[in-house]
Amino acid sequence: MPNMNVRVRYGPSPTGEPHVGNIRTALFDWLLARRFGGQFIVRIEDTDQSRAVEGTEQLILDALTWLGLDWDEGPDIGGPFAPYRQSERLPMYAEAAQRLVEEASAYRCNCSSERLDALRKSQQKAKQPPGYDRRCRDLDVSAQEPHVVRLAMPSEGDTIVNDYLRGEVSFQNSLLDDHVLLKRDGFPTYHLASVVDDHHMQITHVIRGEEWLSSAPRHVQTYAALGWDEPAWVHIPIIRGPDGAKLSKRHGATSVRQYADEGFLPEALLNFLALLGWSKDETTTIMSRDEITEAFSLDGLGLASAMFDIERLREMNARYIRDLDPSDFLRRGRPHLETRVGSSVSDGALERLLPIAPAIQERVKLMPEFADYTDFFFTEGPLEYDNSELMGRAYRNKPWAALESVEASLKTLRSIDETEWTTPGLEAALRELASERGEKPGAVFTPIRVAATGKRIAPPLFETLETLGQALTVERLNAAAERLARPDD
Ligand code: GLU
């Protein structure tokens, strides 16, 4: 396969926020194109104008960009087969439909919607399969009348779809009706538009969800009628939630943007999505985009249904966060911190967090949590917390004992030489203090942690104090001592 000619297209309909299932198709397209040096094309399938939602084309492109899936041809950048929006390609569909009618492979139909409704109802009643009864197939409906164009499907025999993952899939023609190619308003249906575009755009592989497999015999017949070569068909398993049902909003976030907003990293989502239907081998799960691209082939796709396990995605995300370069981690965390503190955070201020970044990376599972572990470095004025938190378990209901401990800590912290204000220096001094006082380290450390950060759960204490600096640490411990000294607080 290495020198395979690959042109693949992602054909989203601009009807809403791009969904993860849909984006996974784009990912497989992109991977195949990048692996074999081919082209990845974005084509906006907007022939159903009643369902089109303004602005969603941009959301689709943004989602691809966020995941790092760049395209070679598309509605925004054009390309040799422009335009890349189906609504701008109407003459090509009309021409194909016209040729099919002239060659008697298709025909004009003027059945009214009332007639079609009545037909459907009577079929339902008689428990017959639904479908058009071909009334107009032998009539010569004039082009001047309002009409649709239908493909004259074979009524006997089978249509074989050669699917890459399934081999030959056979469909009984008697169960397939003469579907509409061109609607009354001159717009094509998906069935016609996708075939015409895939042919003109020289698409080699059609990768799409298996919900389209049942339409594939219609497409195969359209190719045959037009005398065109078919692309390779690759129908990938649909994504299911843990309950086995098709992934939907009920399973939580499903739009790519929601995952971004919740704090998933694009590389984690990409890795996770790649494994929904594809694998390199039985064991490898964590792979960078380059590694996936390198290993990707259609043969790695499988038919087992792809289960969307959000816990797995969370774990992967935590792992990716942990593995980020610390300065990259800080840069990505910055917007969350800025939202929390309500002001911008300078590069210099961010850099001060560099020594503590790896410890925070161990704890953050979703990027917005970055703010929980860093906001107190930027808080001006007193921190908010309860005295009970300050006292912790060791000094519960004993403010005087907590005060005594905080004062002893203060004394130690004040006496530390500036050059010793380091993680090991602080650790040695405070552990010694605890042992001198005959107390468990946790008893002494809890009030210091809460006083310095305002939280019981914070990054590791000594790294935190080192980053906070001696002056601010002492100031915050003083404030804590004052609070403890006021018994009615
Ligand atoms: N417009 C179709 C969709 O949004 C594309 C199907 C295909 O890839 O052929 O699902």
Image (tube, rainbow, N blue to C red):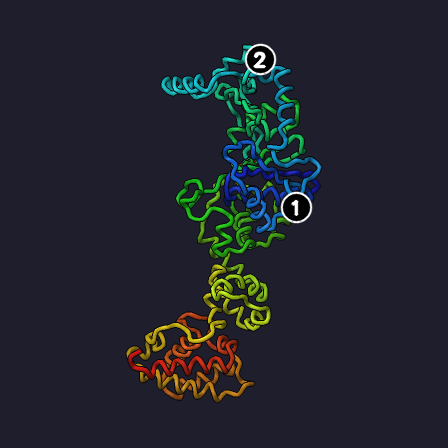
N-terminal of the pair, mark 1 or mark 2, is: 1
Residue 25: quarter of image = top right
Task: Tell me residue 434's x, y (percent).
Answer: 40, 84
Mark 1: which amino acid? Arg
Q: CA distance from mark 1 to mark 2?
A: 49 Å
In terms of secondary structure, where does tag 2 sit?
loop
Indicate the quadrant of ligand 1 in the picture: top right
- Which numbered tag is attached to residue 142? 2
Residue on which disc 1 sits: 34
Q: What amino acid is found at the position of numbered circle 2 in the picture?
A: Ser
Q: Residue at x 53, y 88 (%)?
A: 417
| Crowdedness near tag 2: few (<14), some (14–19) or many (≥20) residues, C-alpha within 10 Å | few
Task: Give percent across and percent down for residue 437.
Answer: 37, 87
Q: Residue at x 57, y 66 (%)?
A: 326
Nearer the observer, 443 or 488: 488
Q: Nearer the viewer, residue 454 or 308?
A: 454
Question: Where is residue 181 shown, x and y percent of the image?
Answer: 56, 24
Please give the label number shown on residue 416.
none
Q: Is residue 437 left or right of residue 419?
A: left
37 to the left or right of 326: right
The answer to whether the residue labelled 1 contacts the one labelled 2, judged by CB atoms less than 8 Å apart, is no
Q: Quick one: which residue is furthest to the top in this view? A: 139
391 or 207: nearer the viewer: 391
- Under tag 1, what secondary structure? helix
Q: Is residue 26 left or right of residue 310?
A: right
